[in-house]
Image (cartoon, rainbow, N blue to C red):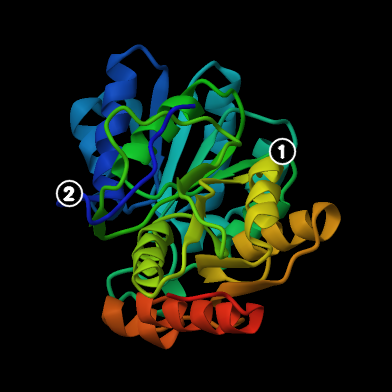
């Protein structure tokens, strides 16, 4: 793959909301011939499944607040040759219909796309009931399901095209608010592959989802202090890119992971498993510390739960100090 390294300071960055891109891309996939149907759990104007409903009303099914039934209907449609995309909040897909997803989608390996909107803690002040900080752990542990968390709208477009032809059940993690676009329009996505966004040998920072944007900012601040951090973006949590993770550990011998998710069972847990088996390395996990979220403004939540750029910068400098890195 020939995707370029990324610098946030090289040019102004536009912003896109992943939920908007998701709705638009579903329309594009269908116009290109995909046998797409969308099943919504009474949240179309929030997840932006309503964009698809306007484009293809005959392929849009409003299932109401009945997530268990929605999963069963999706399974039935998949057996008839359709590719169903489920539309709901991550918090509901992770819990309300998990048994149905496990039994009628995952176990028979049906081609259903489970799209969790409003993931993480930045959910528009919905509060802890509507925030999901354990969804990656849940779906990563469920056999047979791929797990994808894109960093921006461009990666989401490319990931959805790859998903549409994979033939596999897949969990797609989506955020609510607009975030910077970091990838070019020519970006190539392959399920199971990671992207090295920045070279460095002092510290390896491994991240996923839109947290990668904040990680890139952190790496640029580290560079101003004389440290060069490698940034590895992992959009596919499962199957995970073992070779890329081991390569960054070999280069830096010091790893920090970062995610808008619990440190238990998400990206940090997955990286720890990889390194524990293949390349034991000193590492630290940045993420939600085994607690639920709460309602509040985005910046305040990022700071309180240790996901902000300033917090990551502080932890990285602590690690580099312990390592004995040589700042300029």
Residue 157 screen position, x and y as percent: 34, 34
Q: Which residue is drawn at 50% across and 81% down?
A: 317
Residue 38 screen position, x and y as percent: 38, 34
- Read off the residue under disc 1: 144
Q: How many labels does the image show?
A: 2
Q: Which residue is drawn at 52% across and 55% down?
A: 93
Mark 2 or 1, nearer chain start:
2
- Read off the residue under disc 2: 11
Residue 78 figure quarter:
top right
The image shows residue 53, relative to residue 278, as above or below, that is: above
> Tag 2, which secondary structure?
loop
Mark 2 or mark 1, whichever is nearer to me = 2
251, 65: nearer the viewer = 251
> Tag 1, which secondary structure?
loop
Q: Which residue is drawn at 82% across and 51% down?
A: 278
87, 32: nearer the viewer = 32
Count residues near mark 2 (Cα–Cα under 10 Å), then give few for <14, some for 14-19, many for 20+. Answer: few
The image shows residue 190, relative to residue 234, as above or below, that is: above
* Residue 281 falls left or right of residue 161: right
């Amino acid at each position: 793959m020939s995707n370029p390294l990324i610098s946030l300071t090289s040019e102004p960055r536009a912003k896109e909301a992943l939920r908007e891109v998701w709705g638009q891309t579903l329309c594009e996939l269908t116009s290109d011939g995909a046998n797409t149907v969308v099943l919504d759990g009474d949240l179309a104007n929030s997840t932006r499944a309503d964009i698809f409903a306007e484009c293809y009303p005959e392929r849009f099914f409003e299932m109401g607040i009945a997530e268990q039934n929605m999963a069963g209907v999706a399974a039935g449609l998949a057996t008839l040759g359709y590719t169903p995309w489920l539309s709901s909040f991550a918090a509901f897909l992770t819990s309300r219909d998990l048994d149905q997803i496990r039994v009628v989608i995952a176990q028979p390996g049906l081609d259903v796309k489970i799209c969790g909107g409003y993931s993480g803690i930045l959910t528009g002040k919905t509060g802890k009931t509507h925030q999901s900080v354990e969804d990656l752990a849940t779906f990563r542990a469920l056999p047979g399901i791929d797990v994808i968390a894109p960093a921006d709208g461009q990666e989401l477009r490319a990931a959805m095209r790859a998903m549409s032809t994979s033939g596999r059940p897949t969990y797609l993690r989506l955020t609510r608010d607009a975030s910077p676009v970091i990838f070019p329009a020519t970006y190539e996505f392959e399920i199971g592959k990671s992207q090295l966004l920045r070279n460095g040998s002092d510290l390896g920072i491994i991240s996923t989802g839109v947290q990668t944007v904040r990680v890139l900012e952190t790496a640029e601040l580290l560079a101003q202090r004389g440290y060069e951090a490698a940034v590895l973006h992992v959009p596919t949590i499962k199957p995970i890119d073992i070779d890329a993770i081991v390569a960054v550990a070999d280069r830096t011998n010091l790893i920090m992971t970062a995610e808008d998710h619990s440190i238990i069972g998400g990206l940090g847990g997955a990286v720890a498993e990889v390194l524990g088996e293949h390349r034991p390395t000193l590492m630290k996990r940045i993420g939600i510390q085994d607690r639920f979220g709460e309602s509040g403004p985005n910046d305040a939540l990022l700071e309180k739960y240790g996901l902000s750029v300033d917090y990551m910068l502080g932890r990285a400098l602590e690690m580099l100090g312990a390592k004995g890195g040589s700042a300029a």
